Image (cartoon, grey):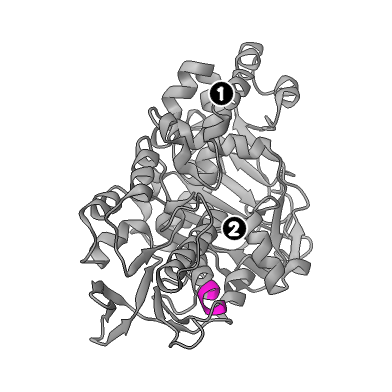
Amino acid sequence: MRGMTAPRVIVVGGGIAGLTAAYTLRKGGFDVQVLEREEVPGGRMRSERHGDFVVDRGAQFIASSYRNMRALVDELGLRPYVRRLRTGRGATLRDGKFASSDYNGVRAILRARDIGWRSKLRLPLIINDLRRARSMLDFYAIEKAAPLDDISAHDWALRRFGREVLDYVIEPPFASTFTVLPENLSRAFVLATISYMFSGFRLHAFEGGNGLLTSTLAARVPVRTGIDVRRVSQTHDGATVQLADGEQLHADAAIIATPGNRVAALCDTLTDGERAFFGGVRYASSIIVFVMTSTTEADPGVYGVGIGRREGVRLYGLAMETPKEGAVPPGKMLFNCAFSEEYAAELISRGDDDIIAALHGELRKLPMRGLDKTEGHVVHRWPELVPQFYPGYIRSLARFGERSARSDRVFFAGDYLVGPYTEGALTSGLRAAAAVRARFSGAPVAAGTPLA
């Protein structure tokens, strides 16, 4: 763009997707501004300090195999702050007890003590499924798995492996990680995720909170916070952004980096195909409650606990913050609990005290002690926690990426375009930036890179 005025780009949404897109474009010489509705940028990758405790509001960990995040972390000089969790082990609740849930590989499956021999003999069939689908299982291009997007994870697991595997191997880890039941997850998504897990990764977090990444990005780009965007419209020569206070902003292009289910209401110039796609974007909702204790009596010695419905506990799972460096004072404990979608829907309009009381009613069903020695709680209500990759969604996503009629000045970023994890959101921001750059500078986009 040497010798010409830098194109102006407005990014609506200051989460990891929007901030990554803005940072990438600004580094490439674009004039960028980020508009964020909250008073603090970061979205679902934001950290809060509550006394001596650090609470990660949304993103709980990062994986060692997140290649795009790793590259960005190195570029920003944040590598010294990335720490491996002291334990990444998981467990499931079975018959009122916590049991190891390490099924990473055939040997681990055969050593597992919490499933019967019939299940152990059937579970390795997943290796055959992964081998047959290998060319379609791409963590960074989930749309390649569209041919497998024909059945729910619930029905696939029940038919292929039986009830025990569904209830104690598939449902607990996926429900606790993605806040979605197997009925609302595609077989294609589950296979792609398992394939990625089998490739090997370790859990890490930023010392002092995962919000370090988004706060560092926000310091590198112009961000206006507390901005309520009402409308984004494509014009013949750019994009117009209408704010709630009546202010109107003009730019050469806009990137909408909000939850995908808000895009259709926000943008009135979508193509028919785009509008149909965004109408099908769904999010899992939940309530996450962080519990701070004055002792470590309740610590089960694992990072995460998945809870299936058969246990009669209305929580999807728990994640321990204690294994993170700099998150919890010595001798104390911090853990977070995810309500089931159904129970969260009942409670989401209730006050914090009612939600906390409901939580402890469920926690009393677990084999944990010391829960009467709490120092405090933090309640987060999430009407849009993570996108649901339900049966049929990946096929829809593939059609969206291949569409011939597309908005020319409005682009999109968000985890719903890649996968419901921080690396997915970050990757979507990189793709949106690449699409904008290609539109205005003619720079080539890497082969096989889906344009947002």
- The crowding category of the residue bearing disc 2, from other C-alpha atoms within 10 Å (few below 14, some 14 to 19, many at least 20), is many
Q: Look at the image and give the residue range highlighted in magenta.
A: 23-27
Of pointers 1 and 2, the one earlier in the residue sequence: 1
* Residue 377 as seen in the image, left or right of residue 85: left
Q: Position of residue 255 (x, y in %)?
A: 39, 69
> What amino acid is labelled 2 in the image?
Val
Instruction: Indicate whether residue 229 is drawn in magenta.
Output: no
Q: Is residue 69 above or below residue 173?
A: below
The C terminus lies in which quarter of the figure? Answer: bottom left
Seen from the viewer's position, the closer of residues 288 and 46 is 46
- Whether residue 319 sits left or right of residue 254 in the image: it is right
Q: Position of residue 386 (x, y in %)?
A: 45, 52
| Disc 1 secondary structure class | helix
Compute the Cα span from label 1 to label 2.
43 Å
Q: Amino acid at mark 1?
A: Arg
Taking the image as drawn, is residue 162 in sight? Answer: no
Residue appearing at x 50%, y 68% in the figure = 443
Kindly identify the residue that appears in the image at 21 percent across and 66 percent down.
268
Where is residue 374? Give x, y as percent. Answer: 63, 59
Identity of the residue drawn at 45% across and 23% down: 156
What residue sits right under mark 2 in the picture? 291
One can see residue 264 in this view: yes
